[in-house]
Amino acid sequence: LISVRFSRTRRDGEPPLVNGWIPFLGKALEFRKNAHGFLAAHKEKHGDVFTVLIAGKYMTFIMNPLLYPYVIKHGKQLDFHEFSDQVAPVTFGYPPVRSGKFPGMDEHIQRSFRLLQGDNLDNLTESMMGNLMLVFHKDYLDGESEWRTESMYQFCNSVMFEATFLTMYGKPAHTNRHSGMVMLRQDFVKFDNMFPLLIARIPISLLGGTKIIRDKLINYFHPQRMSTWSNTSGFIKERAALFEQYDCMGDIDKAAHHFAILWASVGNTVPATFWAMYYLLTHPEALAVVREEIHCVLKVSGLEADHNRDVTFTREQLDSLLYLESSINESLRLSSASMNIRVAQEDFSLRLEGERSIRVRKGDIISLYPQSMHMDPEIYENPEMYKFDRYVEDGKEKTDFYKDGQKLKYYRMPFGSGSTKCPGRYFAVNEIKQFLSLLLLRFDMEVVEGQEPCSLDSSRAGLGILLPATDVQIHYRPRQAREEE
Ligand code: HEM
């Protein structure tokens, strides 16, 4: 490993600097393995704001969530896109959007995100429900009544990957499902396994066959092929039309952009779905309340759980599933480990609360690490415990959480913050709700007894939802079949 001499000395007004000889890459990987513990130990020693050199970058961590608003509102001096515009193109293989080569494209891309939200969610939700039912029925509910065994992650991955893909990109001509979906998913998993290394800017040429796999994945989205697909979401259609306006953008570059959106839309959603399902299935009291809530909503709308009819949920019905939403948010709290990054655009003084401020140098990174907040016992009693109704109070969503006696503006941040907050967050929560509702309505399912509790694999700490360290075996059978016995 390369070592760099720590040449910078702390100036007046700057946060404490974690000093010493720091292995260039080693620290980054060590950090990734146990970021939560690493930061907690430094917080203990240096207080709630400190600077560490990680992978060649000076990173200032703001550990106290009461200080988060001071960072999040600093849009002008603290920029997120500078970082993502360097890292995403290298990871997904497209030319940087803000390089000057594609004038106006960045603004258009940002504007396209509205197509994932608000009224646009109605179409997405309807399409997702149809696609979820298609995949569930064809692959898992094909009439057999006996119990089957499956790996839970595998199950979530195969259903959510394909249903999300169909909802985003549409279906091929003359048939409902894309050929080669299993291969695409397998290649995606291989690429995704390398994702933490690519984000750490390890050249793809050093990562074995990863480049070949990425090229294959990108090629799946060749504009010629995509032009034959129908039922494509407005979001993807608008982006495809935008890319057509730039003559200097090659077909493979366009395809690479679409591939990046595939990663954004399933990379976190699949593990998030896994955790939401795992916690429900391993907490019978939560499962009973959530199941009852889903049945109630369907009954109120006159749509009893008739197994021969398609289930439809309106967006309002999905919004009214308070306990289901709380259970999903609770599993996101327990499994998310994303880092919010801002890059200082100039030397400046970052105002924190009261008279307090810190000096920041141009090019430095300011980081929020919400996992530390999610696991803070002062904010969340018994933070390592899954409490499905943690976010419900008096029949409404609970939004008041406290630190040092003060109400927190930010208390749950799996989707990032401020202007760079995930634009797909409403769609993501909706699709997980749809997946779980169908699961509870259409399947009998249980976790196979005698397995170790599932733990988090921290190897992608900082990058989003953590994967499980091991898969979990489940038994399932179609509900309808049982009732007809
Ligand atoms: C960005 C989380 C699902 C589309 C992000 C960011 C996070 C995140 C943490 C970075 C924000 C920041 O750094 O401040 C998640 C989680 C998901 C999820 C936890 C699932 C549980 C989705 C879905 C879509 C999506 C389903 C699309 C359909 C995007 C896009 C960006 C993004 C396009 C980049 C935004 C930009 O460049 O400004 N997501 N996401 N995400 N997400 Fe999500």
Image (cartoon, rainbow, N blue to C red):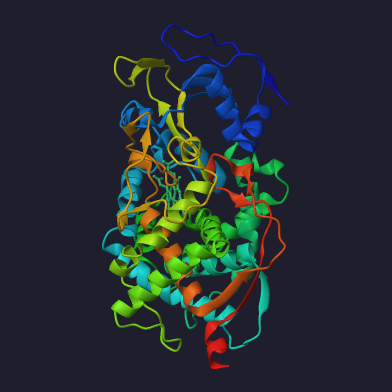
Q: Name the residue located 65 percent from the left edge and 37 percent from the top edge.
A: 33
- Report which quarter residue 216 is drawn in: bottom right
| Residue located farthest toward the bottom when viewing the structure as drawn | 485
x and y, in percent, of residue 363 in the image: 45, 22
* Quadrant (top left, top right, bottom left, bottom right) of the N terminus: top right
Residue 78 seen in the current view:
yes
Q: Name the side, left or right, on which 472 lies relative to 264.
A: right
Q: Name the residue located 46 percent from the left edge and 38 percent from the top edge.
A: 370
Q: Nearer the viewer, residue 80 or 66?
A: 66
Q: Name the residue located 37 percent from the left edge and 66 percent from the top edge.
A: 233
* Quadrant (top left, top right, bottom left, bottom right) of the C terminus: bottom right
x and y, in percent, of residue 316 in the image: 28, 67
- Report which quarter residue 379 is drawn in: top left
Q: Nearer the viewer, residue 100 or 217?
A: 217
Residue 226 seen in the current view:
no
Q: Name the side, left or right, on which 398 lies relative to 16.
A: left
Q: Count the marks.
A: 0
x and y, in percent, of residue 222 in the image: 51, 62
x and y, in percent, of residue 79 in the image: 38, 31
Q: Name the residue located 51 percent from the left edge and 62 percent from the top edge.
A: 221
Residue 346 vertical position relative to residue 172 in the rendered view, above or below:
above
Q: Nearer the viewer, residue 431 or 119?
A: 431
| Residue located farthest toward the top when viewing the structure as drawn | 12
